Image (cartoon, rainbow, N blue to C red):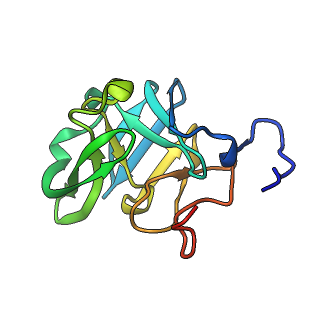
Amino acid sequence: MNPPKLDPGQEWVWNYPRPPRLEQSARLVRVEFAGREIARSTRTWRVLETSHPPIFYFPREDVAMDALRSTSGGSFCEWKGNASYFDLAVGERISRRAAWTYEHPVRAYSALTGAIAFYPGRVDAAYVDGERAQSQEGNFYGGWITSETVGPFKGSPGTEGW
């Protein structure tokens, strides 16, 4: 696949590495749900993986943990290990499996221990430095698409084999 022409500051997700790279971020990253700010941080981790838009992981201290409820089930990432999930609940509104964490990630990703990631499509709004992020297609991947990320992105129908 040939890289597209990128504007200054843009990243082509096919240049991201595999296995994924962890990158600390000082950007202001926020999540809103049911009229409430659920997460706000300038000390997130970005996970950058080939063909995926970045995923932001928030330190728990920067998340309204009272709005998260542990839920059953989990998933396995070949790189990071076993993930567990949270429902997001504010008042009468509930978003199922809106967030996840790695309580015991593999050593290479130990910086993510206990950090919380959110699916941008399962919250009311997710922002990176004031820009509203779009969600990655599909029901499994949780990438945050902004104007700086250029695809095509894995997740839409027909991309399972990428």
Q: How many labels does the image show?
A: 0
Compared with 154, 11 (above or below) is above
Image quarter where the C terminus lies is bottom right
Q: Is 117 on the left or on the right of 120, as rendered?
A: left
Q: Where is residue 47 in the image (x, y as percent from the top left)?
A: 49, 37
Q: Position of residue 19 (x, y in %)?
A: 51, 38
Compared with 138, 17 (above or below) is above
Compared with 140, 76 (above or below) is above
Identify the residue at horizontal 22%, vertical 32% (top origin).
Answer: 104
Q: Is 15 on the left or on the right of 98, as rendered?
A: right
Identify the residue at horizontal 19%, vertical 48% (top origin).
Answer: 68
Q: Position of residue 50 (x, y in %)?
A: 59, 46
Q: Is 91 on the left or on the right of 115, as rendered?
A: left
Q: Is 107 on the left or on the right of 162, as rendered?
A: left
Identify the residue at horizontal 40%, vertical 67% (top origin).
Answer: 139
Rendered image quadrant of residue 87: bottom left
Image quarter where the N terminus lies is bottom right
Identify the residue at horizontal 54%, vertical 76% (top origin).
Answer: 157
